[in-house]
Every structure is written in C-alpha cells, then in structure tokens.
Image (cartoon, grey):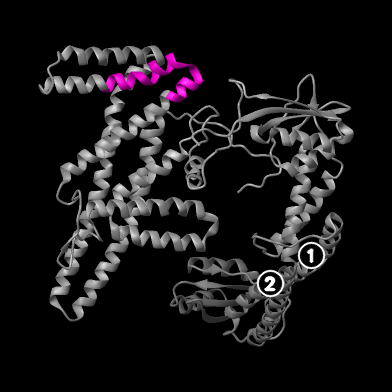
Amino acid sequence: MLRPYQMSSVIITGPKNIQEDVIKEIHKQKVLHIVEHSKNELADIGMPLESASRLSEILVKARALIASLNIKKEENKFELKRGLLEVESTAKKLGEEVSANLDELKKAEALMAKDESVKQELEILKNIDIPLEYFTSYKSLAYFTGYFKDEGRIATLKEELSKITEKFMLLDSTAKKRSFIALFIDAKLKENAGDVLRKAGFIPANFVNIVSMKGNASSNLKKIDEEIKRLGKKSEEIKKRLESIGQEYKPFLLAAEEFLSEQLEKAEAPLKFAATQSSFLVKGWIPLEQLQSSIERLNKAGKNKIFVHFEPAKKEDKVPVKLKNPKHAKPFEFFLDLYTMPSYKEIDPTSIMFLTFPLLFGFMLGDFGYGLTTLALFIALKKLMPKARNFFNVLIFASLASIFFGLLFGEFFGFEEIAGFHLPHILSRADDINGLMYLAVGVGILHINLGLLLGFFNEMNSHGILKALFAKGSWFILETGIVLLALSALKIIILPIYIGLLMILLAAVMLFKAEGIRGPIEIPSLFSNTLSYARLMAIGLSSVVLALIINDSAKEFFHKGGFFILAGILILVIGHTINIGLGLLGSFLHSLRLHYVEFFTKFFHGGAEKYRPFGMKDA
C-alpha cells in the first residue's frame, strides 16, 4: 500500500520474422512498459512495419473527417466488421462526399462574402440617383468618391470648385453618419480638384466591386439581397447535409480512429526497439506479479523462438512507477499526478494523504452545515461529470471531514445555537482563538514529524540505517533538544540547560555530516514550517467570522418583519454561498500547500516516470 508495485526488468529478443506476432501479443497483454532504444554501435533503431505508412495515411483521413464534421470524441460501442478493409473503403467514399460538400460550401460562402462587399458599396450609393456605369474609367472625365467628416464642407467645396471650373457635377448623401460625395470633373483639372478636396479634409473611398454593374444602386441592392438570401439558404442546406453525414457516420469514424490508432501504434512499435539485419530486441519493465504469465504467453506467440531475460530492478535503474493503492485511496493519486511520481524505492504518500488531506481541509472549513451542503453538491457533480470522478471523490471525503469537525466545533452555518438549543462542542472557534491556534500548531508538529519519520524509512531503504540516522534522525534529536531547553528554562524539569544545547549542537553536526552546510542552514525552516500550520486557524477563523457577520446582518432584517424577512433570507443564501465558495477554495489550496511544501519536503523526492504499458490507453 505504501510501496509501488515491484517491477522486473525484461529484455525480449528474437528473429524479425516473428516480430509482428510478438508486437501483437505485447499490445494485447498491456503490461510491458517499453524503454526506447537509442542508436549505438551494437544496434540500430528498428524500422516500422510495412503497414505503417498505409495506416498513417488512412488515420490522417479519418481524423480530418472527424474534424470536418465537428464530431466530438465520446464513449463509443460501434464495432467494425471487416477491419482495415472496411475503414479504408468507407473513409475513401466518405472523404469524397464530404470534400464535395465542403468545396460547394466554400464556393457559396466566398460568393456570399463578395456579395456582402458589393452590398456595402451599394448601400453608400443608394441615395445618389446616378447610373453605376458612371463609375468607370474615362479619357476626358475624372471622378472622386469619398467622405467628409464635417457636413458643412459641401457648400464650401462647391465654391472652391467653381473657382477652378463651372463644368463639374457634385452629388452628395449621408452614409455611415458622414457626408458622402461623388464628384465628376474634367480630367485635365483632376490634380487641381484633388488639391481642393485634400484641403477640405476629404477621405477617398474606392468602389472596386461595382465597376461592371449597370443601373442604379437601389435596383441592384434588391438583386444582391436576393442573391445573398439564396446563397445563405444553400449554405445552410450544405451544413445540414454535413451535419446529417456526421450523425450517421459518427460511431463508425470514432471506432475507425480508435482502431487505426491502435494498429499504427503496433506498426510503429519497432521504432522503440533495437534491431540488427535479422533480429530485434525490446527492453522494458513488467510488474513482478504479471511476469511469469506474460513470458508464457510471449513464448507461445513467438513460437518458442524468442529469448526473454528478466531480473529485479537494480539500485541505479530508472524504474517506471505503478502505484499500488486500495480503491478508497486511489482518487488521491490525483495529487501526485499534479506534483510528481514517487521514485521506485520511496514511500508512496497517497494512502497517507487519504487521511491527512481531508483532515486539514475539514479543520479549516469545519462547519456541519457547510459540510452537508458541499457533500450533496459534489455527489451531484460526480454524477454529472463522471470523467472527473476522482477529483470529486477527494472533495467528498473532504466534505465528510468538514462535517466531522463541524460537530467538534459545534457550528451549523456559523450558528452555535439553533432555536434555543446550544450545539455541543469540544472547542468554539469563535471564542477560543488561542486554543484553536495551539491545536493548529500541534497538528503541524504531528504532520511534520510524520514526514520526517517517512523520510527516515526512505533514507534507510535507499542508503542504509546510518544515513537515515544522520539525515532524518538528527531532526528528532534537534526537536528533543529544543523541548528540553524550553522545559529547563521554564523550570518545569530540573535539568541543566546545557543538555538541551548539546543535543541541538549534536543534531547540527549530524545534519552537516549528512547534507553538508545545507543541513544546519535548514534548521530555522523547522520553526517556519511549524508556524505555517497557523493558517489552519486563520482560514477557519475567517470563515467563522464571515458566517457570523452574515447571520447577524440577516437577523437585523428578520427583526423588522414584513418584506425585510425576504431580504434577510437572500442575505443568508447569497452570503453563505459566497462563504462556502471562499471556504472551499481556501481550504483546498492551503491544505494542498501544507502537503506539498511543509510535508513532502521532509521525505519526498519523486521524479520517477509513470508506468505506461504498451497498448494501454491513457485514463
């Protein structure tokens, strides 16, 4: 329970003519964690199976179809009847159909986008009754189209243009809350007219989409609107067709993607192997309890032509770790996935966190009513989101701990008295702050020393008893020295003060011997780590105080009666909802921090690779 599964190093080698059969068996067993081979003088990296290229090509098509049809991945029970043959032929046929529809959709949307651009230009010109043919290139005539921010510029502009020539036509309208003009003038006077317009603050606008159109803007707008509607309808029809295809072929495509992924994984497996011209070699790890049955099945699949060498893990080996925890503690492996896996010879803290994390969480939230509310919430969320069930299982245990501490503290939504009945309690958080502080620090001392004790066993397993005594036993000597020094100074025990000092000095020397100068430097961290557990009191007290404020505020409204009773109920509901949310967040994060920073650092190094057997899907 506190140790991961025992692993055995395995080397499998054999002739290449049975390589594919061996790969299929390894994939089927799902027990071998493959260690990838690096090319060296003795052996090259293996080549993928002949089917790899074909499988990869079909898989890319299948995934492209899944993406094109917006198919979401989910559990699927569809079974392929003819394997790769069925997948390849159906994917090809479906790909052609989807591609044709997508091309048609793309064309429709491109035309619609172009029509929208035309419509925007026509909208500007719809209030100017002028044939669109005028907006074309002339040898003797020049024209300008654009805007003025200031509407009063139009009259001034006419005066300025009249000074140049009397032969011009100026049309204007309001477009996009700005004054729009269309000016036609003799081509010889184009530069002069341009200067006048620039001085007047003219902003040119080019019409590139209507140069080939005839008639006025208003009549063309109707045609464009009809065309946009037609294209929009066509686009929706194509989308519905694609949606229908997606619904029809969703089970098949999901099954095909899973099947192809598995087949490609097997086809590319030799890329992890060592290889010569005639043989292959694969190295990996198998849990010891599955080793014998695995070897028997491999020999059968390899027609007794393979050689399997196995041996226990050595001290210097980088062993992948498979955690071994009872069902009730397994959800707490979530915290190690967030942090890091324990090394092969380290104690796995999952089962310990199963006890300590909810207790620290419950100490902080510590309200019977809050615990019941969050328990109901997390049970409901677990049903709604089954993929996150491990996370919600952790929170369910934490809620149960909150109920337990709520009974110890005698709190129900911040109330210590309900309808004249005083809730029994061992400690009142609101009234006995000093007691709560001492209890929090006491919990910290126990938690830290548990970490040191686990560290002692880790050091003993990895480096022997002497190293464990110097590296971890020294901390217990240090604590004993501090306690004796304090008791002697307070005259509680009759013992010379120097005895405590000598024990502290001895601990410092032992730490220096074990870890160098870093050891004695870390001595002050013992005090800071212990005081860090005062947050158990602080977070809990802040939750209590806020609950009391909410209750007192609501009580004031209840005393006024009438409509104010409803306001009081709203204050209770909203206030306690916010307080529960803050309490959950604070309790979770701070409990996690106390484990990662104060607890794990006393014994946990981690850094191991997670056991991922070939053929096993990620959970």
Residue at point 27%, 42% (across, down): 535
What element does badge 1 sit on?
Answer: helix
Is 153 left or right of 583, judged from the image as shown? right
**Does label 2 or label 1 sit earlier along the sequence?**
1
Residue at point 49%, 66% (across, down): 199
Is 50 left or right of 480, judged from the image as shown? right
The residue closer to the viewer here, 119 or 337, is: 337
The magenta stretch is: 457-479
Dot 1 alpha-carbon crowd within 10 angstroms: few under 14, some 14 to 19, many 20 or more: some
**Residue 99 — which label?**
1
Q: Tell me residue 220's x, y (percent).
A: 67, 84
Indicate the amino acid at tag 1: Ser
Q: Tell me residue 594's x, y (percent).
A: 35, 38
Q: Is residue 475 magenta?
A: yes
Q: Which residue is mark 2?
A: 114
Position of residue 388 relative to residue 167, above or below, is: above
Separation (CA) of disc 2 from disc 1: 22 Å
Residue at point 78%, 56% (across, down): 61
Q: Tell me residue 265's x, y (percent).
A: 75, 44
Q: Which image quadrant for residue 10? A: top right
- Counting the numbered discs, the total is 2
